[in-house]
Image (cartoon, grey):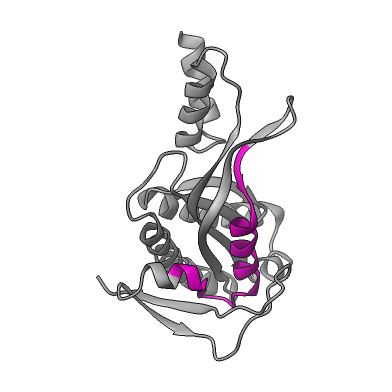
Amino acid sequence: VLEKRRVTKTFKRYVDEKIVDELLSVEEEEGAEPRGKEVEIAVLFVDVRGFTTMSEMLTPSQVVQILNRYLTLIEHCIHENHGTLDKFIGDAAMAFWGAPQPQEDFIMNACKAALAMREGSDKLSEELMEKFGRTVSFGIGINVGEAVVGNIGSPDRMDYTAIGDTVNTAARLEANAPKRTIYLSEAVVKRLEGRIRVTPLDHLLHLKGKAQDQQIYILEEILE
C-alpha cells in the first residue's frame, strides 16, 4: 500500500492528478480495458511567443529556469480554473475541460484560464525586460466540440489524451494567434454569447486542414 501511494504521488508530478485518478479507477475495475470515449470538451492550446529568439542570448540554465516559470504559470492557470493539463510540448501546452469527469460551465472555465495566462505572462514579461531587455508572451487558441478522450496508443505505451477535429482546430487557432492574443472559434463564441466581449477578425482565416475559411474571434474580456 505504501509503495502504491509513493508511485501514485510520483506519477502525479508528470501526469495531471485527475487523469491519474481516472486511470487508477479503470485499472481497479475487474476486466476493464483502457479505452476512449466520445465527449464534448473545450480544448486550449498555448504557446510562448518569442521564446526561441530569447533563448539564443541565454545560457542553457537560464533557458530552463525561464521556461519552467512559464510552464508553472500555465499549469497554475489551468488547475485554478478546473482544467486538465494534457501535456507540455516544448514551450507549448495542451489542456481540456469537460473530462475525465463532466463539468459545469467548462467552456467559460477555459476562457478564464486563458485570460489568467495572459495577465500572468504580462507580469513575467516585465521581469524579463528588466533582466534581459527582451520579452515574450502567449498565443492561445480555444475550441469546443466532440472529441475522443481516453487512453490512446499501443499496449505498451499509452497517453491519456484527447484526439479529433476539435483538438486539431484548437491547435490551429493557437498557431495563428499573435502574441498576447486569445483566438476563439465561432462555436465557443456562440456558446458564451452575452457573457464575453470579443472582437471578430475583419477577414476569414484559413486553418490548415479545413476546407472552408473560418470566422475567428479575439477574446477581450469576460463580462460577468
Residue 222 at x, y percent in the picture = 32, 72
Residue located farthest toward the top when viewing the structure as drawn: 1
Residue located farthest toward the left when viewing the structure as drawn: 224
Residue at image point 44% right, 84% down: 199
Q: Is residue 90 magenta?
A: no
Compared across the picture, whether 108 is left or right of 20 comes to left
Compared across the picture, whether 180 is left or right of 163 comes to left
Image quadrant holding the C terminus, namely: bottom left
Residue at image point 73% right, 70% down: 208
Residue 23 at x, y percent in the picture = 53, 27
Stretch in magenta: 160-188
Residue located farthest toward the bottom when viewing the structure as drawn: 202
Residue at image point 42% right, 64% down: 120
Above or below for 21 versus 69: above
Above or below for 66 versus 14: below
Compared across the picture, whether 78 is left or right of 175 comes to left
